[in-house]
Image (spheres, rainbow, N blue to C red):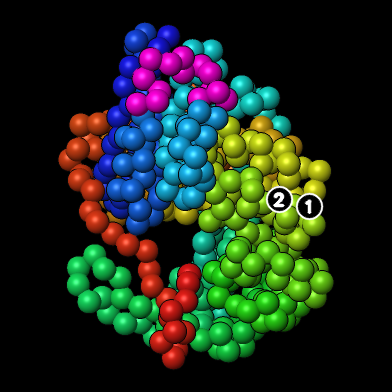
Amino acid sequence: MKITEVRVILTCPTRNYLFVKILTDEGVYGVGEGTLNGSELAVATAIEHAAELLIGRDPMRTEDLWQLVYNWTYWRAGPVYMAALGALDLALWDIKGKVAGLPVYELLGGKSREGVLTYGHAGGDEPAKVADSVRSFLDRGYKVVRAQQGGYGGSGMASHEPSPRRNVPGAAYFDPASYLAETPKLFEHLRAELGDEVELLHDVHEQLTPIQAAWLAKQLEPYRLFYLEDPLPPEHYESFRVVREASTTSLAIGEVFTSRWDCIRLFNEQLIDYIRIKPIHVGGITEARKIMVFAEPAQIRSAFHGAGDIGPVGQAASLHLQISIPNFGVQEWIDFGTEGAARLREVTPNPCEWRDGYAYPHETPGLGMDIDEDAAAKYPYRKAYMPIVRRTDGTMHRY
């Protein structure tokens, strides 16, 4: 069997997604995903450039092809290139599963559990409304819920600046003082209303200094969070020692990581409890599996990123890996049930099943996913950017 073609599929049925198909001379093809919110055009160019390396090669040699695409360029890693490699790697694993007649998780060692525990996103502009939102997720069957007050970015978002023109984001202005004052009160209210058995987590979105993050983690200790996500920017791993030494609140980070090299020091020093990678952004299943093997002796569990800017193919890859690894924690979950879901199902029919708080990979060979190229062509790519965040004095910051 030889690879004959690599197709890049950019589409926007609900938001922008980047999918690939790798075709072979025996009629078997694999599908992958390299969606990178706001940067899909760059990823598409990287895939098209790397695709020439794959033509004529044996698609079953997933490890060798991963090493080829990773190393040939000399300029290794980075989010754009690793998303491109991730898309190709997923498609190669899909082919391998189809040739073997097995779902991908069987090739990874088989099931370690029957389903993948998931969490959803609850929110509101005041504690009572957040509590009502959490209840709505519990009523649907969720066992773990992320609780945020004040919309995306949290209660510290003081104001928003309108967009200067179509598709270019306006700015959100963040005030750490109000965020730090209100967040402990939110979880005090949630525990009083919902009890201690509900598993709750919270996302800081990298908005705090080390001392602020340490203070917040300490204040949240009585409310026993499942974990506190992204308390600090990941580039400053040394600062995680400050938070770790101040509190026993569980910590999670990693959704912007692109390789095992981002994880090494955090793992070696056990500075986190959950790693938030996802296969499509770290070079695919091949690399994500190695990262989780490395995490296991450090007693670090998975909590794969799964927001709406990851499509159904990337979601399926996460489930195949997470149902097989021993050090599983939780999977962030979006059911794509928003307006326009019918259009997305045209492009990627047969999404993975979710019921009663758990998600399940397909039992069919490969990843169990497909891409309808004719449907994808009906919804052309729309240029888009990630949000812009500033401090209240106008200083540029981050989400």
Marks 1 and 2 close (CB-CB < 8 Å) = yes
Q: Is residue 210 visible?
A: yes
Secondary structure beneath label 1? helix
Foreground residue among 315 and 212: 212
Asked if residue 276 is positioned above or below residue 163 in the image, the reply reads: above
Check the picture and name the quadrant holding the N terminus.
top left
Residue 264: image tag: 2
Q: Is residue 344 magenta?
A: no
Q: Amino acid at mark 2?
A: Ile
Which residue position holds label 1?
Answer: 268
- The kind of secondary structure element at disc 2 is helix
* Residue 232 placement, left or right of 21: right
> In the figure, 238 relative to 20: above or below?
below
Local crowd at mark 1 within 10 Å, few (<14), some, or many (≥20)?
Answer: few
Q: Which mark is residue 352?
A: none
Residue 268 in picture, x, y percent from top left:
78, 52
Of residues 160 and 143, the one drawn nearer to the viewer in this rendering: 160
At 64% from the left edge and 48% from the top edge, which residue is drawn? 261
How packed mark 2 is, by other alpha carbons closer than 10 Å (few <14, some 14-19, many 20 or more), is some
Q: Report the residue at 54% width, 49% height from top.
A: 258
* Residue depicted at x 39% and y 29%: 31
Residue 230 seen in the current view: no
* Furthest residue toward left: 378
Magenta residues span: 52-65
Q: Is residue 189 left or right of residue 283?
A: right
